[in-house]
Image: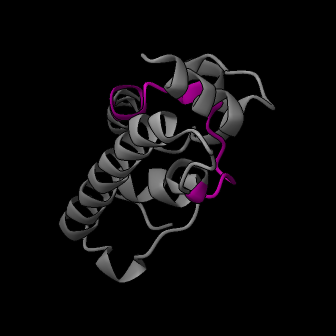
Amino acid sequence: MSKYWKDWISERFGDRPALPREVATRAFWADLPREKLEEFFQFMEVEYSLDAGLLRPEDLLQRLTAPIKTRNPLRWFIVESRIEDAASELNYEIWKRAQTARLIDCLPLFTVGEYVRVWCGKSP
């Protein structure tokens, strides 16, 4: 993971500790299927190199997709392209899962909590 990406994560999530998966699951998503929740956690860790324990249900998805603010063109190029790629994959996955679960009418989603519920096939 590049220094710029680590900085981006710190800027977006540096205000909170990363909870262990078990703690986050019990605290926020105990009613959701464990297997699908684990898939979501894996997805976030692969696409964003982000410890899923940093996420909270009330987080706006913008926290993950908002453009980077910098005057450094190299930093912008490295981070912005990765943000856009991950956001595209995020949108594709949720669209696919919403369609499978017949929740397409619930789109668009705005929070991580809504996203996780639809990912797991539940209504937001």
Tell me residue 24's x, y (percent).
63, 29
Q: Is residue 72 visible?
A: yes
Asked which colour scheme the image uses, the reply is one colour
Q: Quadrant of the N terminus?
A: top left
Residue 22 percent coordinates (x, y): 58, 19
Q: Is residue 33 in sight in this rendering?
A: no
Q: Considering only vertical position in the picture, is 10 above or below 96?
A: above
Q: Which residue corresponds to the image point at 66% horizontal and 42% vertical from the top-left?
A: 56
Q: Observer-nearest residue: 117 or 88?
A: 88
Foreground residue among 31 and 89 = 89
The foreground one among 23 and 85 is 85
Residue 123 position within the rendered picture, expressed as x and y whole percent measured from the top left: 45, 67
Region in magenta: 43-62
- Relative to 13, 108 lies left or right: left
Q: Quadrant of residue 110?
A: bottom right
x, y percent for residue 118: 40, 59
What residue is rendered at 20% in x and 61% in y? 96
Give the vertical position of 119 relative to 98 (above or below): above
Q: Is residue 24 left or right of residue 88?
A: right
Q: Is residue 62 above or below residue 26?
A: below
Magenta region includes residue 48: yes
Which residue is rendered at x = 62% and y = 45% of the image? Answer: 71
Q: Could you say which quadrant of the image residue 113 lies in?
A: bottom right
Query: Is 97 colored magenta in this rendering?
Result: no
| Residue drawn 45% across the image and 18% down it | 2
Q: Is residue 49 left or right of residue 27?
A: left
